[in-house]
Image (cartoon, grey):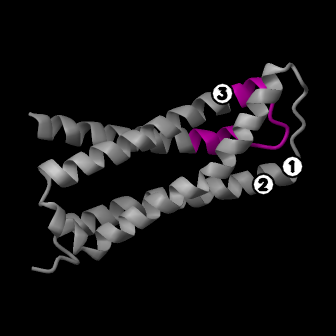
Amino acid sequence: MSEYLTAYLHYLSIMILFAALFSEHLLLKPGISAKQIKSLIITDAIYGISAISVLITGLLRMIYFGKGVSYYMKNPYFHTKLTLFIIIAILSIKPTIEFMRWRRSLKKNEDVKINDELIKRLQLFIRIELLFVLIIPLMAVLMARGYGATF
């Protein structure tokens, strides 16, 4: 039962991660309002929590419920998946820092002035993250079907 629950939570977390990231993409636009910034901050928190959940449930699946750590460690598609996940995590730092900066300004009741160039740069980060998130399932399918496996 634990195996099924862990798999379910892993897939659910991936869907929430994608939905949150896509929502960030939709919310982040030139002329963003204070209300939209607040929604963006909440969405980014959901994104972060779901990413942690994906990581934890993925590790649990690999260590306890999968084909064994050695299978994954020898598979180039697993390494590609993991590398993409790490790159996504690194790319998400800049937007999160900016969102936290905007949050501090809003808490001080300061008017948040956001340069359109910054918005475009953050949009690029998020779009790259979305692209990489979409590549990860392909790597998972290839890995699950035995491609890249060395016996």
Q: Amino acid at mark 2?
A: Lys
Q: Pointers 3 and 2 in contact (CB under 8 A)?
A: no
Q: Amino acid at mark 3?
A: Ser
**Which residue appears at 18% of the width and 62% of the height?**
69
Residue 78 badge: none
Q: Closer to the camera, 20 or 41?
A: 41
Residue 33's place in the image compared with 135, above or below, is: above
Point out the image quarter for the N terminus.
top left
Question: Does residue 70 appear in the picture of this structure?
Answer: yes
Q: Closer to the camera, 62 or 14?
A: 62
Q: Closer to the camera, 129 or 94?
A: 94
Residue 115 picture location, percent across and down: 88, 47
Q: Which residue is mark 1?
A: 116
Q: What range is drawn magenta here?
A: 22-38
**Which residue appears at 19% of the width and 64% of the height?**
144
How far separated are the C-alphas under marks 1 and 3?
Answer: 19 Å
Under circle 3, the secondary element is helix
Residue 33 picture location, percent across and down: 81, 29
Q: Pointers 1 and 2 in contact (CB under 8 A)?
A: yes
Q: Give yes or no for residue 85 being in the magenta stretch.
A: no
Q: Amino acid at mark 1?
A: Asp
Residue 56's place in the image compared with 1, above or below, is: below
Snapshot quadrant of residue 13: top left
Residue 96 picture location, percent across and down: 65, 43
Q: Residues within 10 Å of mark 2 (few under 14, many from 20)?
A: some
Under circle 1, the secondary element is helix
Q: Residues within 10 Å of mark 1 (few under 14, many from 20)?
A: few
**Which residue appears at 18% of the width and 34% of the height?**
5
Q: Give yes or no for residue 28 being in the magenta stretch.
A: yes
Residue 10 picture location, percent across and down: 29, 42
Residue 39 badge: 3
